[in-house]
Image (tube, helix red, strand yellow):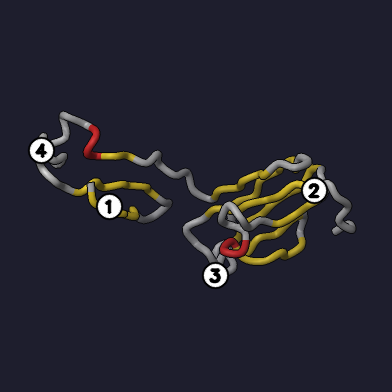
Amino acid sequence: MARLDPPLGRLRTISPDKFAAVYVTGKFMGRVGEFNNPVQGLELNPGEYTVRIDPVGGAEGKKEHIRIETDQVTIVRTAKQAPVTNMSDDSSNPWAPAAGETGRTVLVAAGADRVSLGLRQA
C-alpha cells in the first residue's frame, strides 16, 4: 500500500461475521469488527481498490471493486440487510399495542443468517 497522503477517504465493512478477514488490493488489513461502526474505518488515499472479505474458515468471500473519495465513507457489506420495521406503527398489525395500551416496540433487522431483535419500551 502507498503512503497515506491527506486528505483521505474511509472504508467501512459490515458483516454478521465480525472476524471475517478484510483484504484491500490483496493485502490483509484486519478484521471486519475493526472497521464496522461509524467512528471506525480504514483510512485510504482516494482511488480505486479491490476489497475482499473472507469468512472465518478460509473460504474466499465477497470481492468488490470500490472507489474511495476524499472525505467520504465507502461501505462494503457482505449481506444485504433488511430495512428496520417498527411493528407498533402499523394499525393492521395484530401485535401492535391498542390505543391507550402500553406495549413494546419491536425493531427487526435481518442479517445474512439470523434476525436480531431489539426491544424498547413504547
The mark lying in front, picked from 1 and 3, is 1
Dot 3 corresponds to which residue? 57
Q: Residues within 10 Å of mark 1 (few under 14, many from 20)?
A: few
| Mark 4 vs 3, N-terminal side | 3
Q: At numbered mark 3, what does the secondary structure look like: helix, strand or loop?
A: loop
Q: Quadrant of the N terminus?
A: bottom right
Q: At numbered mark 1, what does the secondary structure look like: helix, strand or loop?
A: strand
- The reply to whether discs 4 and 3 touch (Cβ–Cβ < 8 Å) is no
Q: Nearer the viewer, residue 122 or 111?
A: 122
| Mark 1 vs 4, N-terminal side | 4
Q: Nearer the viewer, residue 101 or 117?
A: 101
Q: Amino acid at mark 4?
A: Gly
Q: Amino acid at mark 2?
A: Leu
Q: Mark 4 and mark 2: span between their CA atoms?
A: 52 Å
Dot 1 corresponds to which residue? 120
Residue 100 image label:
4
Residue 3 image label:
none
| Mark 4 vs 2, N-terminal side | 2
| Mark 1 vs 3, N-terminal side | 3
Q: Residues within 10 Å of mark 3 (few under 14, many from 20)?
A: few
- In the image: residue 87, left or right of residue 69: left
Q: Residues within 10 Å of mark 4 (few under 14, many from 20)?
A: few
The mark lying in front, picked from 2 and 3, is 2
The residue at 65%/60% (across/down) is 22
Q: Mark 1 and mark 4: span between their CA atoms?
A: 17 Å
- The reply to whether discs 2 and 3 touch (Cβ–Cβ < 8 Å) is no
Q: At numbered mark 4, what does the secondary structure look like: helix, strand or loop?
A: loop
Q: Position of residue 69 (x, y in %)?
A: 76, 40
